[in-house]
Image (cartoon, rainbow, N blue to C red):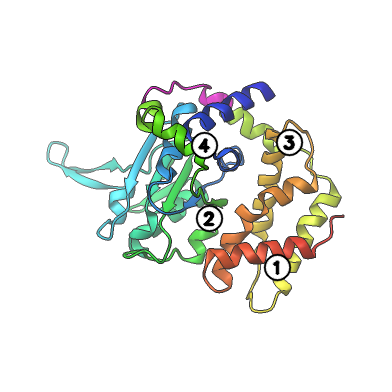
Protein backbone atom coordinates (compact mmCIF):
# COMPACT_ATOMS: atom_id res chain seq x y z
CA UNK A 1 0.00 0.00 0.00
CA UNK A 2 2.74 2.47 0.95
CA UNK A 3 4.62 1.75 -2.30
CA UNK A 4 1.53 2.53 -4.37
CA UNK A 5 0.97 5.76 -2.48
CA UNK A 6 4.60 6.75 -2.99
CA UNK A 7 4.30 5.98 -6.71
CA UNK A 8 1.26 8.25 -7.02
CA UNK A 9 3.01 11.09 -5.20
CA UNK A 10 6.11 10.58 -7.33
CA UNK A 11 4.12 10.76 -10.55
CA UNK A 12 2.33 13.92 -9.45
CA UNK A 13 5.65 15.43 -8.37
CA UNK A 14 7.09 14.79 -11.83
CA UNK A 15 4.38 17.03 -13.28
CA UNK A 16 4.41 19.79 -10.65
CA UNK A 17 8.13 20.19 -10.06
CA UNK A 18 9.49 21.38 -6.75
CA UNK A 19 6.12 21.32 -4.99
CA UNK A 20 6.24 18.03 -3.10
CA UNK A 21 4.56 19.36 0.04
CA UNK A 22 1.77 21.10 -1.87
CA UNK A 23 1.14 17.95 -3.93
CA UNK A 24 1.04 15.91 -0.73
CA UNK A 25 -1.49 18.30 0.81
CA UNK A 26 -3.72 18.13 -2.29
CA UNK A 27 -3.55 14.32 -2.22
CA UNK A 28 -4.33 14.41 1.50
CA UNK A 29 -7.44 16.50 0.81
CA UNK A 30 -8.66 14.02 -1.79
CA UNK A 31 -8.12 11.05 0.54
CA UNK A 32 -10.05 12.88 3.27
CA UNK A 33 -13.05 13.27 0.92
CA UNK A 34 -12.78 17.05 0.96
CA UNK A 35 -12.67 19.94 -1.47
CA UNK A 36 -9.56 21.98 -2.20
CA UNK A 37 -9.10 25.72 -2.68
CA UNK A 38 -5.88 26.87 -4.37
CA UNK A 39 -5.13 30.58 -4.21
CA UNK A 40 -2.21 32.08 -6.10
CA UNK A 41 -1.26 34.31 -8.98
CA UNK A 42 -1.88 33.05 -12.54
CA UNK A 43 0.71 30.77 -14.10
CA UNK A 44 2.11 28.84 -11.12
CA UNK A 45 0.38 25.52 -11.83
CA UNK A 46 -3.03 25.60 -10.12
CA UNK A 47 -4.89 24.18 -13.13
CA UNK A 48 -2.01 21.81 -13.89
CA UNK A 49 -2.32 20.23 -10.44
CA UNK A 50 -6.07 19.68 -10.89
CA UNK A 51 -5.60 18.08 -14.32
CA UNK A 52 -2.79 15.86 -13.04
CA UNK A 53 -4.87 14.59 -10.11
CA UNK A 54 -7.78 13.76 -12.41
CA UNK A 55 -5.55 11.91 -14.88
CA UNK A 56 -3.62 9.90 -12.29
CA UNK A 57 -6.82 8.65 -10.67
CA UNK A 58 -8.72 8.21 -13.93
CA UNK A 59 -11.55 10.47 -12.76
CA UNK A 60 -14.28 11.93 -14.93
CA UNK A 61 -13.17 15.57 -15.13
CA UNK A 62 -15.03 18.78 -16.01
CA UNK A 63 -13.70 22.32 -15.94
CA UNK A 64 -15.83 25.42 -15.42
CA UNK A 65 -14.31 28.83 -16.16
CA UNK A 66 -15.93 31.21 -13.68
CA UNK A 67 -16.60 34.67 -15.11
CA UNK A 68 -18.66 37.67 -14.06
CA UNK A 69 -21.56 36.67 -16.35
CA UNK A 70 -21.69 33.00 -15.29
CA UNK A 71 -25.14 31.80 -14.16
CA UNK A 72 -25.94 28.97 -11.71
CA UNK A 73 -27.55 27.03 -14.57
CA UNK A 74 -24.21 27.11 -16.42
CA UNK A 75 -22.80 25.02 -13.56
CA UNK A 76 -25.75 22.89 -12.49
CA UNK A 77 -27.61 22.38 -15.78
CA UNK A 78 -31.20 23.22 -16.67
CA UNK A 79 -34.44 21.83 -18.02
CA UNK A 80 -35.18 22.38 -21.71
CA UNK A 81 -38.53 21.77 -23.35
CA UNK A 82 -38.53 18.80 -25.74
CA UNK A 83 -41.17 19.29 -28.48
CA UNK A 84 -41.21 15.57 -29.30
CA UNK A 85 -42.15 14.41 -25.80
CA UNK A 86 -43.82 17.72 -24.87
CA UNK A 87 -41.96 17.63 -21.58
CA UNK A 88 -39.08 19.46 -19.96
CA UNK A 89 -35.92 17.33 -20.07
CA UNK A 90 -33.09 17.98 -17.63
CA UNK A 91 -29.66 18.47 -19.16
CA UNK A 92 -26.93 18.00 -16.53
CA UNK A 93 -24.30 20.70 -16.19
CA UNK A 94 -20.54 20.28 -15.63
CA UNK A 95 -21.07 19.80 -11.88
CA UNK A 96 -21.99 16.18 -12.69
CA UNK A 97 -18.43 14.84 -12.73
CA UNK A 98 -16.17 13.05 -10.27
CA UNK A 99 -13.74 15.96 -10.27
CA UNK A 100 -14.82 19.52 -11.03
CA UNK A 101 -12.35 22.35 -11.52
CA UNK A 102 -13.94 25.71 -10.66
CA UNK A 103 -11.30 27.86 -12.31
CA UNK A 104 -10.93 31.42 -10.96
CA UNK A 105 -13.98 30.89 -8.77
CA UNK A 106 -13.77 34.37 -7.26
CA UNK A 107 -14.27 36.06 -10.64
CA UNK A 108 -17.94 34.99 -10.59
CA UNK A 109 -20.68 36.79 -8.70
CA UNK A 110 -21.86 35.45 -5.33
CA UNK A 111 -25.01 34.14 -7.05
CA UNK A 112 -22.95 31.93 -9.37
CA UNK A 113 -20.61 30.90 -6.54
CA UNK A 114 -23.60 29.71 -4.52
CA UNK A 115 -24.29 27.04 -7.15
CA UNK A 116 -21.50 25.00 -5.57
CA UNK A 117 -22.72 25.12 -1.96
CA UNK A 118 -25.19 22.22 -1.87
CA UNK A 119 -23.03 20.08 -4.14
CA UNK A 120 -19.93 20.51 -1.98
CA UNK A 121 -21.72 19.91 1.32
CA UNK A 122 -24.20 17.15 0.47
CA UNK A 123 -22.97 15.55 -2.76
CA UNK A 124 -26.21 16.40 -4.52
CA UNK A 125 -27.89 19.32 -6.23
CA UNK A 126 -31.51 20.45 -6.38
CA UNK A 127 -32.92 21.95 -9.57
CA UNK A 128 -36.57 22.84 -10.14
CA UNK A 129 -37.52 20.99 -6.97
CA UNK A 130 -35.83 17.76 -8.09
CA UNK A 131 -32.76 16.45 -6.25
CA UNK A 132 -30.02 14.76 -8.27
CA UNK A 133 -27.16 12.78 -6.68
CA UNK A 134 -23.62 13.54 -7.83
CA UNK A 135 -21.02 10.92 -8.80
CA UNK A 136 -18.82 9.13 -6.26
CA UNK A 137 -16.18 10.17 -5.51
CA UNK A 138 -16.98 13.87 -5.90
CA UNK A 139 -14.16 16.34 -5.55
CA UNK A 140 -14.11 20.10 -6.23
CA UNK A 141 -10.86 21.94 -6.84
CA UNK A 142 -11.36 25.69 -6.99
CA UNK A 143 -8.67 28.15 -7.97
CA UNK A 144 -8.82 31.80 -7.11
CA UNK A 145 -6.69 34.83 -7.76
CA UNK A 146 -5.56 37.03 -4.87
CA UNK A 147 -8.29 39.44 -3.84
CA UNK A 148 -6.13 42.43 -4.75
CA UNK A 149 -6.50 41.46 -8.43
CA UNK A 150 -9.04 43.36 -10.54
CA UNK A 151 -12.46 41.78 -11.09
CA UNK A 152 -12.58 39.44 -8.10
CA UNK A 153 -15.38 38.87 -5.58
CA UNK A 154 -14.48 37.66 -2.08
CA UNK A 155 -15.74 34.19 -1.21
CA UNK A 156 -18.27 34.30 1.65
CA UNK A 157 -17.48 32.54 4.92
CA UNK A 158 -20.07 29.83 4.26
CA UNK A 159 -18.31 28.84 1.05
CA UNK A 160 -14.79 29.07 2.46
CA UNK A 161 -15.84 26.71 5.25
CA UNK A 162 -16.88 24.07 2.71
CA UNK A 163 -13.32 23.80 1.44
CA UNK A 164 -11.59 21.22 3.57
CA UNK A 165 -8.18 22.69 2.77
CA UNK A 166 -6.66 25.76 1.16
CA UNK A 167 -3.12 25.86 -0.21
CA UNK A 168 -0.81 28.18 -2.12
CA UNK A 169 1.67 26.90 -4.70
CA UNK A 170 4.08 29.81 -4.93
CA UNK A 171 7.01 30.07 -7.33
CA UNK A 172 9.12 26.95 -7.97
CA UNK A 173 12.74 26.82 -6.93
CA UNK A 174 15.44 27.75 -9.43
CA UNK A 175 16.43 24.17 -10.26
CA UNK A 176 12.79 23.08 -10.72
CA UNK A 177 12.08 26.07 -12.95
CA UNK A 178 15.19 25.36 -15.02
CA UNK A 179 14.02 21.78 -15.51
CA UNK A 180 10.65 23.09 -16.71
CA UNK A 181 12.37 25.39 -19.19
CA UNK A 182 14.45 22.53 -20.63
CA UNK A 183 11.77 19.83 -20.49
CA UNK A 184 8.46 19.08 -22.19
CA UNK A 185 5.43 21.30 -21.90
CA UNK A 186 3.35 20.43 -18.82
CA UNK A 187 0.19 20.13 -20.94
CA UNK A 188 1.84 17.51 -23.12
CA UNK A 189 2.97 15.56 -20.08
CA UNK A 190 -0.56 15.57 -18.65
CA UNK A 191 -2.06 14.54 -21.98
CA UNK A 192 0.22 11.50 -22.08
CA UNK A 193 -0.27 10.67 -18.39
CA UNK A 194 -1.97 7.27 -17.97
CA UNK A 195 -4.28 6.49 -15.01
CA UNK A 196 -2.31 4.81 -12.24
CA UNK A 197 -5.10 3.38 -10.09
CA UNK A 198 -8.76 2.51 -10.46
CA UNK A 199 -11.49 4.62 -8.91
CA UNK A 200 -12.38 1.66 -6.70
CA UNK A 201 -8.90 1.69 -5.19
CA UNK A 202 -9.15 5.42 -4.50
CA UNK A 203 -12.47 4.89 -2.70
CA UNK A 204 -10.82 2.06 -0.77
CA UNK A 205 -8.03 4.37 0.35
CA UNK A 206 -10.61 6.94 1.45
CA UNK A 207 -12.35 4.26 3.53
CA UNK A 208 -9.03 3.24 5.11
CA UNK A 209 -8.26 6.83 6.06
CA UNK A 210 -11.34 6.89 8.28
CA UNK A 211 -9.99 3.84 10.13
CA UNK A 212 -6.70 5.51 11.10
CA UNK A 213 -6.70 5.57 14.90
CA UNK A 214 -7.03 8.90 16.73
CA UNK A 215 -6.13 8.66 20.42
CA UNK A 216 -8.04 10.60 23.05
CA UNK A 217 -4.97 12.74 23.75
CA UNK A 218 -4.84 13.78 20.07
CA UNK A 219 -8.54 14.61 20.08
CA UNK A 220 -7.97 16.72 23.19
CA UNK A 221 -5.14 18.49 21.36
CA UNK A 222 -7.49 19.31 18.47
CA UNK A 223 -10.09 20.60 20.94
CA UNK A 224 -7.43 22.75 22.61
CA UNK A 225 -6.62 24.33 19.23
CA UNK A 226 -10.30 25.06 18.63
CA UNK A 227 -10.74 26.54 22.09
CA UNK A 228 -7.67 28.73 21.71
CA UNK A 229 -8.97 30.09 18.39
CA UNK A 230 -12.17 31.18 20.14
CA UNK A 231 -10.25 33.03 22.85
CA UNK A 232 -8.15 35.28 20.64
CA UNK A 233 -9.18 38.93 20.72
CA UNK A 234 -10.76 40.25 17.54
CA UNK A 235 -11.32 36.80 16.06
CA UNK A 236 -15.09 36.75 16.43
CA UNK A 237 -16.49 33.23 16.65
CA UNK A 238 -13.24 31.32 16.10
CA UNK A 239 -13.12 27.88 14.56
CA UNK A 240 -16.37 25.94 14.25
CA UNK A 241 -16.95 22.28 15.16
CA UNK A 242 -16.82 21.52 11.41
CA UNK A 243 -13.28 22.91 11.38
CA UNK A 244 -12.38 20.46 14.15
CA UNK A 245 -13.75 17.55 12.15
CA UNK A 246 -11.81 18.77 9.12
CA UNK A 247 -8.61 18.98 11.14
CA UNK A 248 -9.04 15.42 12.40
CA UNK A 249 -9.86 13.98 8.95
CA UNK A 250 -6.89 15.67 7.32
CA UNK A 251 -4.60 14.48 10.12
CA UNK A 252 -5.80 10.93 9.52
CA UNK A 253 -5.09 11.27 5.79
CA UNK A 254 -1.64 12.74 6.47
CA UNK A 255 -0.82 9.82 8.76
CA UNK A 256 -2.14 7.34 6.18
CA UNK A 257 0.12 8.77 3.48
CA UNK A 258 3.04 8.43 5.90
CA UNK A 259 2.19 4.74 6.33
CA UNK A 260 1.10 4.99 9.97
CA UNK A 261 -2.02 3.49 11.53
CA UNK A 262 -2.44 6.23 14.14
CA UNK A 263 -2.40 10.01 14.22
CA UNK A 264 0.34 11.83 16.11
CA UNK A 265 0.33 15.55 17.05
CA UNK A 266 2.83 16.29 14.29
CA UNK A 267 0.20 15.21 11.76
CA UNK A 268 -2.22 17.78 13.17
CA UNK A 269 0.44 20.48 13.03
CA UNK A 270 1.37 19.56 9.44
CA UNK A 271 -2.14 20.12 8.09
CA UNK A 272 -3.24 22.89 10.49
CA UNK A 273 -2.25 25.88 8.26
CA UNK A 274 -4.13 24.46 5.25
CA UNK A 275 -7.22 23.62 7.31
CA UNK A 276 -7.40 26.57 9.70
CA UNK A 277 -5.98 29.65 7.96
CA UNK A 278 -8.77 30.33 5.45
CA UNK A 279 -11.37 29.93 8.21
CA UNK A 280 -9.51 32.19 10.62
CA UNK A 281 -8.75 34.75 7.94
CA UNK A 282 -12.44 35.11 7.08
CA UNK A 283 -13.29 35.60 10.76
CA UNK A 284 -10.64 38.19 11.40
CA UNK A 285 -9.45 40.86 8.98
CA UNK A 286 -10.60 39.05 5.86
CA UNK A 287 -7.15 38.23 4.52
CA UNK A 288 -5.62 34.81 4.20
CA UNK A 289 -2.22 36.00 5.41
CA UNK A 290 -3.75 37.10 8.71
CA UNK A 291 -5.27 33.63 8.94
CA UNK A 292 -1.83 32.03 8.54
CA UNK A 293 -0.39 34.28 11.23
CA UNK A 294 -3.23 33.42 13.59
CA UNK A 295 -2.79 29.71 12.90
CA UNK A 296 0.91 29.92 13.75
CA UNK A 297 0.07 31.86 16.92
CA UNK A 298 -2.48 29.24 18.01
CA UNK A 299 -0.19 26.26 17.31
CA UNK A 300 2.65 27.90 19.26
CA UNK A 301 0.37 28.73 22.19
CA UNK A 302 -1.17 25.25 22.60
CA UNK A 303 0.97 22.61 24.25
CA UNK A 304 1.01 19.07 22.87
CA UNK A 305 -0.70 16.65 25.24
Q: Is residue 235 left or right of residue 115?
A: right
Mark 1 or 2: the one toward you: 1
Mark 4 or 1: the one toward you: 4
**Spatial separation of the CA atoms under disc 4 and disc 3:** 39 Å
Q: Give SS at disc 2.
A: loop
Mark 3 or 1: the one toward you: 1
> Sequence order check: which comes first, mark 2 or mark 3?
2
Q: Give SS at disc 3.
A: loop
What's the magenta region?
191-201
Q: Nearer the viewer, residue 161 or 259?
A: 259
Q: Would residue 1 be seen by someone viewing this image from the given angle?
A: no
Residue 266 at x, y percent in the picture:
77, 47
Image vertical order of residue 153 relative to residue 15, above or below: below
> Where does label 4 land, which residue?
175
Q: Quadrant of the N terminus?
A: top right
Quadrant in the picture for residue 180: top left
Residue placed at 48% from the left, 60% from the top?
159
Residue 160 at x, y percent in the picture:
51, 59
Residue 254 at x, y percent in the picture:
68, 40
Q: Is residue 142 left or right of residue 9?
A: left
Q: Give SS at disc 1.
A: helix
**Spatial separation of the CA atoms under disc 2 and disc 3:** 23 Å
> Where does label 1 land, which residue?
229
Dot 1: few (<14), some (14–19), or many (≥20) neighbours within 10 Å? many
Amino acid sequence: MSVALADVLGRLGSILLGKDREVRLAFCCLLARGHLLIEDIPGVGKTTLAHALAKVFGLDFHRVQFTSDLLPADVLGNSIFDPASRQFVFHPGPIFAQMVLADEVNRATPKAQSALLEAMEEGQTTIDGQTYPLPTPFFVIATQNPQRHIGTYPLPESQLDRFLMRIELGFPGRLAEKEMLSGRDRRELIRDLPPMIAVEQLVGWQDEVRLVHVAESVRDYVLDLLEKSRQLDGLGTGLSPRAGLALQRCSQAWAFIAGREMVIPEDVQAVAPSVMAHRLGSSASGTEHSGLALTEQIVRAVAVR
